[in-house]
Image (cartoon, grey):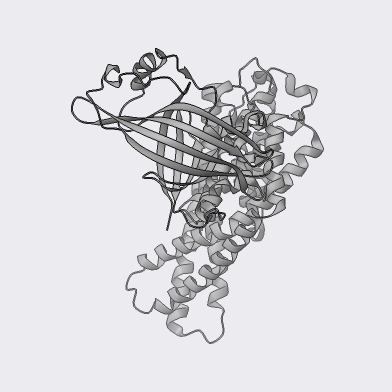
Amino acid sequence: MPSTESLETEQKYDVVASTALPELMQVPGVGRVAEPVTDRLEAVYFDTPTLALAARRITLRRRTGGNDHGWHLKLPAGGNQRQELHAPLGQPDAVPEELGRHVHVYTRGEKLVPVARLSTGRTTHRLYGPAGEHLADLADDMVHAETLHPAQTVQEWREWEVELVHGTERLFADAEEVLTSTGAVRSGHPSKLARALGEAWPPERVADTREPRNKGPAADVVTAYLGAQITELFTHDPGVRVEAPDAVHQMRSATRRTRSALATYRPLFDKSTVKKLAGELKWLARILGKARDAEVMRERLRQHLNDLPGQSGTGPVEATIEHELETTYNTGFRETLSALGSGRYHQLLTDLENFRDHPPTTPRASRPAGTATAPLVDKAGKRLKRARKRAKQAKSGGRDAALHQVRKDAKRLRHAAESVEVIHGKRARKLAKAAKRLQQILGDHQDSVLARGLLTRLASEPGLPPEAARTYARLLKIEEDIARDTQAAYRKAAAKNSLKIRLRH
């Protein structure tokens, strides 16, 4: 059964065992308090031996009792909110695969083991508004906690937990005055597990980046940009594992953007570190690209077949193309899953975070961002200019490869310009837009090159029926027309002055 998802918004209060619950009707906006409901909740919390999830403020537990028994995975979602995913109870010591996929990017091959067992006597008071709307629940919890790792301890405490249902965060402020009047205080622990683990609770692993400023260090531009791409990579990793729509594309895009940034700004950092990271990112992008490229090609050729006038007789060709690309996709997807489960991928994730948080800078990285980044972005522009010149001079046999290089250099320039939009404003945005346009045109051209290669190979199969040969010829004609049109569009786009923008005055 697939997991379900919800958004949890709550606040916790520490309170001594003898404190009487205040009159909840005193909370502004509360029109009725339902009869309390009592439950006994038993929960076992799981983490890696190094508490990798706790360091990210992620909790994973299996709970019995109450009306939401099962496995719960809670991921930080900003402020008081957490994204909560649920899965059925299943086996006590077997983390459901659908939840494990969401944390693999953090556990990185480490085994998930029980780290704490909590037994909670919970009395729930449901708070309703004047019109009968369910605003929030106040849970009065008596907790008995046993830690299992890294050390065995036993504690007991009482806490109040206010969780929004349909109410707004205004209710938190209104409830706080009433609750704290009894002596209750806002909890200093983000979760029951944090309190149970005590001194073993690890410091939070957060991205150590600063907002780039024109006169701030140039390194901040790179670490902020890389930080955003690492977040994208982590976000889409679970989706890739379950073949979620567009997940592979988004993850590969984040990988490529990161590599582009390292290439553009490599003079600011240790050369060997950048080279190693860039090489590993290239490996990951190549692996991700196999399934993605087959997926794109399949949709492209499907559309061409649908557009052919009088489609009778295209069935055998369509079946051959589908089989060819389905096989390629499946092979690529298996390779992707293997790569995402490998130690090589896990090390890359660790190295990326370490680079972001502790960048191996050179003295040049401490120069003001405005003056230090402009020549590096402009250098990417000059690189693109040289590639365009080579493409213009290329003979017909090498023109496709030359245009593909122009596309790659346009992509690098686009990513470089995007990374400094906060520093260089309108000029950077115009440059990024122009480079993106060039990249998109030549992306279509490169897809046409690959499609023509595939169609030519399939059309050369011995014993091909005449009708199939004619269908392949018609498909090749479509792609040849596209290649001609994209080359014309490229020449027009390349002539625009926007590509001549320089950030250094």
The reply to whether residue 381 is visible in this rendering is yes
Which residue is at 55% across, 23% downward? 422
- Residue 208, above or below 388: above
Q: Position of residue 316 (x, y in %)?
A: 43, 79
Question: Is residue 381 rendered to the left or right of residue 492?
Answer: right
Which residue occupies the foreground of this view, 483 or 195?
195
Which residue occupies the foreground of this view, 492 or 479?
479
- Residue 446, above or below 72: below
Q: Residue furthest bottom?
A: 463
Question: Is residue 367 rendered to the left or right of residue 444?
Answer: right
- Residue 255, above or below 502: below
Quarter placement of the C terminus: top right
Quarter placement of the N terminus: bottom left
Which residue occupies the foreground of this view, 81 or 89?
89
Q: Position of residue 299 (x, y in %)?
A: 44, 61
Which residue is at 53% across, 46% downward? 236
Q: Position of residue 472 (x, y in %)?
A: 47, 74
